[in-house]
Image (cartoon, rainbow, N blue to C red):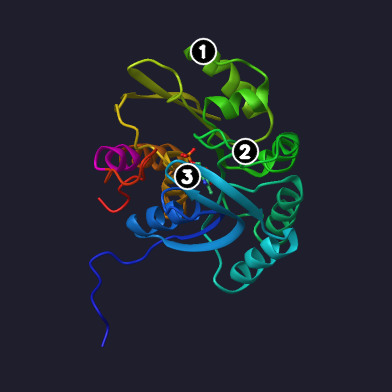
Amino acid sequence: AKHEQPHPIHGRVLIVAGSDSGGGAGIQADIKTVSALNGYAMTAIAALTAQNTTGVFGVVPVDPAFVAQQMTVVLEDIGADAIKIGMLANAAVIEAVAGAYEERAVNVPLVVDPVMVAKSGHFLLEPDAVLTLRKRLLPLAEVVTPNLPEAEALTGIPVRNLDDMRRAAEMIRTFGPKAVLLKGGHLEDEQLYDLLLTEDGEELFEGRRVHTPHTHGTGCTMSSAIATGIAQGQSVRDAVARARAYVEKAILTAPGFGHGHGPLNHLH
Ligand code: PLP
């Protein structure tokens, strides 16, 4: 007998990212997000972190060839409708991931979250690998989703206001991605802007700041939600709009666990 499903699984998303033992960011946030939006989550784990809400206490990168192997075997069998890239740790892993993508998945839309530094200040990407990420992965991306510190690291432009955001987003687009979502949450203002730059021009998404310490994993969650929307056939613009609404509600209903920056509520 065929079982009726109220929310059938739709959209295969391969996540290539790092594990957060605290469950709030990284692979754990990615799986919860894709699942909550009724997508199917697969994972190629690129790094392990020993982490809680107060910080990152250890990082172990995975062997680059084994990251590529995880991608290859799932792509050969199950396939993917979108791929989300998160924490990659170092240049050798970036090269391996780009190689596996080019070999097995060139036509699959790629969402690149250029993860560099955790909110607690810990490096999640070796600083000398920023240029490798820019040259090797951004040209392959359908969308890249930097926050302001990441945009500054990619462009060298200090970003203090909306005009700076426009200049930085335009420069990042010259690095090769089809679209740039520059997330403005690191500006101090009450009014927040996320700037989406595509071949059709600019769209500004506005929001109000939520005053809470519980924002751990917002970047991971946003990029996974965007990848799920794209995997389900949404336009980049519609995927971004749904992802922003999903992240906002996840922040507003966060459970408040831990003594630092607590996790979101992914299953609202
Ligand atoms: N841990 C992992 C594995 C991540 O991928 C990320 C972010 O991308 C973080 C931690 C950082 O999370 P946050 O800066 O939101 O605390």
Quarter of the image for residue 206 reads top left
x and y percentages locating residue 58 in the rendered image: 60, 49
Q: Earlier in the sequence, mark 3 or mark 1?
A: 1
For the residues marked 3 and 2, what is the alpha-carbon distance in whole angstroms?
15 Å
231 inside magenta stretch: no
x and y percentages locating residue 159 in the rendered image: 55, 16
Disc 1 secondary structure class: loop
Please state which amino acid type lies under the numbered disc 1. Answer: Arg
Q: Is mark 3 within 8 Å of ligand 1?
A: yes
Asked if residue 55 is positioned above or below residue 4 in the image, the reply reads: above
Of the two numbered discs 1 and 2 in the rendering, the one whose residue sits closer to the viewer = 2
Tag shown at residue 5 = none
Tag shown at residue 123 = 2
**Extent of the magenta region:** 246-253
Disc 3 secondary structure class: helix
Q: Is any atom of residue 92 visible in this view?
A: yes
x and y percentages locating residue 226 in the rendered image: 44, 45
x and y percentages locating residue 205 in the rendered image: 38, 26
Q: Earlier in the sequence, mark 1 or mark 2?
A: 2
Mark 3: few, some, or many residues within 10 Å (few <14, many ≥20)? many
Tag shown at residue 160 = 1
> 76 left or right of 30?
right
For the residues marked 1 and 2, what is the alpha-carbon distance in whole angstroms?
22 Å
Q: Which of 69 and 57 lies nearest the eye of the viewer? A: 57
Please state which amino acid type lies under the numbered disc 2. Answer: Phe
The residue under the point 56% across, 47% down is: 57
* Residue at mark 3: 220
